[in-house]
Amino acid sequence: MTQGLTVQAELRLAKRMARLGTETAFEVLARARALEAQGKDVVHLEIGEPDFDTPPNVVEAGIDAIRQGWTHYTPSAGLPLLREAIAEDVSRSRGVKVTPEEVVIVPGGKPTIYFTYTALVEEGDEVIYPNPGFPIYESLISFLGAKPVPVHLREEKDFRLDVNELADKITDRTRLIVLNSPHNPTGSMLDEQDVLDIAAAIGDRDIMVLSDEIYSRLIFEGEHFSIMSIPGFKDRTILLDGFSKTYAMTGWRMGYGVMRSDLATHITRLMTNSNSCTASFTQVAGIEALRGDQSSVDRMRDEFKRRRDVFVTGLNKIKGFSCRMPKGAFYTFPNITETGWPSKKLADAILQEAGVACLSGTAFGDYGEGYLRFSVANSLENLNKALDRIQQWTVKNL
Ligand SMILES: Cc1ncc(COP(=O)(O)O)c(C=O)c1O
């Protein structure tokens, strides 16, 4: 008898797996889908992706590319033509000269975070990041054995990073500072003076900046300003951007990092070791996205603005909710402390009992307690339905 061979051994995971966090949006989406499978109607305001389809010219370019045989590997750093198009686009939009050698194309926005940390941050180094903030920043800092150093984004400051607080957190061990504007989950934006002050606080220290600018085309008030364009910072900045949000291309998986060319060669080595390359037909579609008609980007932004206005106005009429007007991205981040409910419990109840899926502020770090995040990437009809449902729920329960 070979009975022993059928016994499953206990899984022995590497210790670092215990330090890996997650993005709660995907978990809430799964729970909402499970409720729908039981027949419940749910309005989805939890996930951070445009509800629009990818613009038709980009779809056609992708289909043509597959037909034309763009179904093989590309160089690990990406197709030269796309790197060129990105370099041109970033040079124009950020007012700083970028060359194709300084661009690495990767499958989405997230890989630039992972690769930057892996290439630059040693165990024990400190990484400063916004909290509340995109949860992957903190998750990967811990995963790689570095020390997460949160900077509290406060509502009183319109959720903009307080430069004095940032300056207090900088130590000799600080290796990297993560900036994100427009900001997920609060929709806040750093203005030019904020970014200049942050640059002054960093001074000439040997600290790198990961500037996550993935929402930089989704701005309703004010103008985007990148730290990369400040003299002396181009060589210390890794600019993260991508196609997911601007061109409604989340499922195509394509983003890019812009960085000094010597670092780009190392990030390219990480690509070779992990993904080989970003999907080739996706990259061909990316050239069309950047060089083709941009009117769909403007249309989507105008529509998000209209929805933001309606939703924030509606939230502010609900007992216990108060919401600032976000300046960019497609999220609203109401303060719910007046409800007397903790964020996670309230988000769970609103999903289970009101049929509206949203995220607890704590999904974005400890300083997210007291808030919920609702995405406005859904139709006005559904947003109004969500407002009605939450309103009715609060009347019954508060
Ligand atoms: C601030 C921020 N950075 C990066 C990403 C990752 O984008 P992608 O889906 O292209 O990996 C997101 C997605 O939600 C985000 O909100």
Image (cartoon, grey):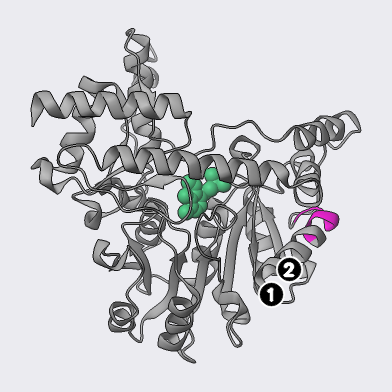
Q: Is residue 70 visible?
A: yes
Nearer the observer, 344 or 147: 344
Callout 2 amino acid = Arg
Q: In the picture shown, does residue 24 fall above or below 210?
A: above
Say which residue appears at 55% left-offset and 68% top-offset.
119
User: Does the stretch in magenta take in 115?
Assistant: no
Helix, strand or loop status at disc 1: loop
Q: Label 1 vs label 2: CA separation?
A: 5 Å
Q: Position of residue 166 (x, y in %)?
A: 33, 78
Q: In the picture shown, does residue 283 fall above or below 164?
A: above
Q: In the picture shown, does residue 300 fall above or below 168?
A: above
Say which residue appears at 25% left-offset and 43% top-offset.
316
Toward which corner of the image does residue 105 lie, by quadrant?
A: bottom right
Q: Which residue is mark 1?
A: 95
Callout 1 amino acid = Gly
Q: In the picture shown, does residue 83 fall above or below 149?
A: above
Q: Quadrant of the C terminus?
A: top left
Q: Position of residue 230 (x, y in %)?
A: 58, 82
Nearer the observer, 99 or 198: 198
Few, some or many residues within 10 Å of mark 2 (<14, 14–19, 20+): few
Residue at disc 1, CB closer than 8 Å to ligand 1: no
In the displayed structure image, the side of residue 101 where residue 312 appears, left or right: left
Say which residue appears at 43% left-offset and 85% top-offset.
202
Q: Are marks 1 and 2 in contact (CB under 8 Å)?
A: yes
The stretch in magenta equals 78-83
Q: Which residue is mark 2?
A: 92
User: Does the stretch in magenta take in 81?
Assistant: yes
Nearer the observer, 350 or 66: 350
Few, some or many residues within 10 Å of mark 1 (<14, 14–19, 20+): some
In the displayed structure image, the side of residue 224 where residue 357 appears, left or right: left
Q: Position of residue 302 (x, y in %)?
A: 57, 44
Residue farthest toward the bottom in the current orientation of the protein: 204
